[in-house]
Amino acid sequence: MSEISTLVTEGHFRYIAAHTVQEDDFLRDLKREARSAGIPPIWISPEQASFMQILLKLAKAREVIEVGTLAGYSAIAMARALPEGGRVRTIEISEVHAAFAEQWIARSDVAGRVEVHRGAGKDVLPTFAADSADAGFLDADKASYPLYLRESLRIVRRGGLILVDNAFAFGQLLDERPTDREVGAVRAFNEYMNQVQGLHSIIVPIGDGLWVGVKL
Ligand SMILES: C[S@@+](CC[C@H](N)C(=O)[O-])C[C@H]1O[C@@H](n2cnc3c(N)ncnc32)[C@H](O)[C@@H]1O
């Protein structure tokens, strides 16, 4: 049997997107309104959302934590994968983003299942109890990822999921002269992930590269 993997090209990404359950009108409207409000379009893709929903269902997740709410797209998508009584606690530092997200969450089919916590991840995460979540999704400032990971490993139960976005550093991971200022932090974090004890993880080539890990 061959160990050679198929190179994932832009064509494959488009193919995956075309063969993924499409997002509904509500999430499309949310994105349109967010753009109009001047919120940057840096939410996860529909295919990444779908993949994360599958992972959450497999993990039988009820409680999810997130750092980086933006407009609420990923929080709403994740909440939709949870059973009745499930909850997403999502942390956002920007008041504009938090207010927009709260408005749209309140109008969504998962209103009451998503809590927006205002503040910096480094200040809010320590207020969450140990073993109080089944999954965590990190999608905010990259320099803080090692700290967020350590906190998430405290908050997420054993056997729970750790998801971390942008392992491909906005497409610039392998560039010799990257232009984005966070590329260095992503590269350092990727190395750190390889050494972290108590986590079995791998980068999945979906979206901008998604770390998927299971807490051992
Ligand atoms: C990539 S966006 C999140 C996208 C969102 N997860 C989605 O897919 O719909 C990153 C968000 O993290 C927020 N952020 C940046 N630094 C932060 C920090 N230190 N603590 C909490 N949120 C932060 C930004 O304001 C921005 O809204």
Image: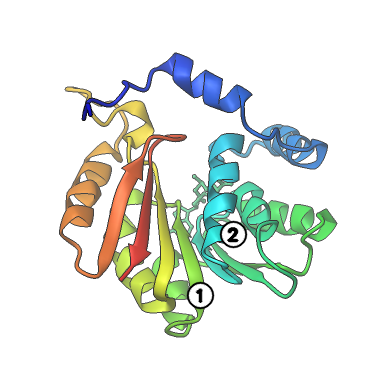
- Determine whether 10 is above or below 214 in the image: above
Q: Give yes or no for contact between labels 2 and 1 (Cβ–Cβ under 8 Å).
A: no
Q: SS class of the residue under badge 2?
A: helix
Q: Residue at x 30, y 70 (%)?
A: 150
Q: Is residue 141 visible to the viewer in this orientation of the structure? A: yes
Mark 2 = which residue?
57
Q: Is residue 41 visible to the viewer in this orientation of the structure? A: no
Give the mark, 2 or 1, whose residue is nearer the N terminus.
Answer: 2
Residue nearer the viewer, 202 or 114: 202
Inspect the image, locate mark 2, and give the three-letter code of the amino acid beneath it: Lys
Residue 27 rendering spot, x and y as whole percentages = 74, 41
Residue nearer the viewer, 182 or 109: 109
- Determine whether 56 is above or below 38 in the image: below
Query: For the view shown, which residue lies furthest in the front direction?
Result: 1
The answer to whether 189 appears left or right of 49 in the picture is: left
Placement of the N terminus among the 4 image quadrants:
top left
Inspect the image, locate mark 1, and give the three-letter code of the amino acid beneath it: Ala
Total marks placed: 2
- Determine whether 53 is above or below 155 in the image: above
**How many neighbours does mark 1 have within 10 angstroms: few (below 14), some (14-19), or many (20 or more)?**
many
Placement of the C terminus among the 4 image quadrants:
bottom left
| Location of residue 167 by image quarter | top left
**How many neighbours does mark 2 have within 10 angstroms: few (below 14), some (14-19), or many (20 or more)?**
some
Mark 1 = which residue?
133
